[in-house]
């Protein structure tokens, strides 16, 4: 049976694993986008080189046809860079046009090729894309611009405004007999008080309790037992002594034991039946009307088998944990709409003892102990103090054996 702390620990580990997977997926997407952009750059470079080579060949042919005898011809070599070749092509084209029009020898361009580092220029990628667009090529990328992989910071949780916080928590331990009957039920409760504001550390807590028949209460050694027994007030023996600030203090405990089945929040029946070469496992639950249960998980152990069990019917959801050999029946909420439910699955023939013990986990915002906080006041002037109170009941160990 897993404790509440172990469950929280496993949830934290699973959350870290999920975060790592998300980061890996984002990194893989970024790598794919970089590869695609690099491919576009290479295609642009090849297209530009082909365009320059074509222009150079055309200009050389023009010069050969129109240059008069003795005129200097323009030649390009493979050692010329793309920028220099482009400049010479421009000069050659100008010379050819000047001679053909009879305007005489061409004038040299006053503006030479730019050299050195240019600040504020467009990125090379944009230059390549623009050159391709100028030639009529469609080079629009089919992906969105890359976004920052740094996640936005989560909003800070709202700070509590109450001066005092109280938690009423109960843990339930139950052992049910598979053939029917309650073997043992034990309930342990605790009230924790935490003062957040030092100015409100000198206080008394007024409570309201029901009959609570069969409950045994015990106050903290520093709490005035007589004041609590006679007036239902939780206060320190020394009224001039403040409660500790910034740390939770257990001020009241209680315990309850019974073998009365009517006190159970939920009862479980399991009927494994062997029929030929298979075993049909029928499970049903029945919950009390006095309490709503959240996050109910009924875990039935299963013997080793090659194939997962076949579920014929299920009120709720199910999951088969093949690694641990456990069939989990999940009911998110049990309230007035579904106080009872059933599930049936088929598995290869097995000994009926293999399906026990059955573990049951659940929580509730209602408690067995009928106790509430009515108000909190300062001992100095009787002024009321703001407070918040949270109730919870957890199944610590709940089994059908």
Image: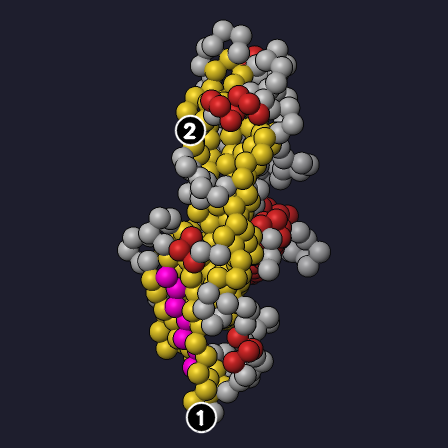
Residue 20 placement (x, y as % from top left) = 61, 53
Which of pointers 1 and 2 indicates the residue nearer the eye?
2
Q: In this view, does 282 lie to the left or right of 351?
A: left
SS label for mark 1 = loop
Residue 235 placement (x, y as % from top left) = 55, 20
| 181 and 118: which is toward the camera | 181
Residue 224 placement (x, y as % from top left) = 58, 22
Point out the tag, 1 or 2, that comes first from the N-terminus: 2
* On-image quarter of the C terminus: bottom right
The magenta span reads 280-286
x 43%, y 65%: residue: 268
Q: Is residue 290 above or below residue 216?
A: below
x 62%, y 29%: residue: 220
Q: Is residue 237 magenta?
A: no
* On-image quarter of the N terminus: bottom right
> Local crowd at mark 2 within 10 Å, few (<14), some, or many (≥20)?
few
| 277 and 101: which is toward the camera | 277
| 377 and 296: which is toward the camera | 377
x 41%, y 25%: residue: 374
Q: Which mark is residue 276?
A: 1
Q: Is residue 79 left or right of residue 138?
A: right
SS label for mark 2 = strand
Q: Is residue 284 magenta?
A: yes
Residue at mark 2: 208
């Amino acid at each position: 049976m897993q404790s509440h702390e172990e469950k929280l620990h496993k949830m934290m580990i699973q959350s870290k694993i999920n975060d790592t997977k998300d980061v890996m997926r984002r990194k893989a997407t970024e790598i794919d986008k970089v590869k695609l952009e690099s491919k576009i750059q290479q295609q642009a470079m090849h297209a530009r080189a082909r365009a320059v080579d074509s222009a150079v060949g055309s200009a050389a042919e023009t010069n050969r046809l129109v240059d008069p005898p003795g005129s200097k011809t323009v030649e390009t070599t493979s050692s010329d860079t793309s920028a220099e070749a482009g400049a010479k092509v421009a000069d050659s084209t100008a010379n050819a046009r000047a001679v053909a029009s009879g305007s005489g020898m061409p004038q040299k361009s006053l503006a030479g090729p730019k050299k050195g580092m240019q600040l504020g220029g467009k990125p090379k990628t944009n230059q390549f894309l623009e050159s391709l667009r100028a030639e009529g090529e469609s080079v629009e990328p089919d992906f969105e611009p890359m976004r920052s992989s740094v996640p936005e910071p989560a909003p800070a949780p709202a700070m509590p405004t109450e001066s005092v916080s109280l938690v009423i928590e109960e843990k339930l331990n139950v052992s049910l007999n598979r053939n029917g009957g309650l073997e043992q039920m034990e309930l342990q409760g605790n009230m924790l008080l935490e003062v957040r504001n030092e100015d409100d550390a000198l206080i008394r807590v007024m409570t309201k309790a029901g009959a609570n028949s069969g409950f045994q209460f015990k106050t903290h050694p520093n709490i005035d037992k007589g004041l609590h027994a006679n007036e239902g007030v939780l206060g320190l023996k020394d009224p001039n002594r403040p409660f500790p600030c910034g740390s939770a203090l257990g001020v009241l405990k209680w315990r309850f034991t019974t073998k009365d089945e009517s006190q159970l929040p939920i009862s479980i029946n399991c009927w494994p039946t062997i029929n030929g070469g298979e075993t049909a496992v029928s499970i049903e639950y029945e919950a009390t009307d006095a309490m709503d249960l959240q996050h109910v998980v009924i875990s039935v152990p299963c013997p080793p088998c090659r194939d997962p069990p076949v579920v014929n019917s299920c009120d709720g959801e199910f999951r088969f944990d093949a690694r641990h050999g456990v069939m989990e029946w999940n009911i998110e909420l049990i309230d007035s709409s579904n106080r009872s439910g059933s599930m049936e699955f088929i598995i290869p023939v097995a000994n009926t003892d293999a399906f026990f013990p059955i573990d049951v986990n659940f929580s509730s915002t209602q408690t067995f102990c009928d106790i509430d906080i009515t108000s909190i006041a300062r001992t100095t002037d009787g002024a009321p103090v703001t407070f918040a109170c949270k109730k919870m009941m957890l199944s610590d160990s709940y089994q059908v054996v």
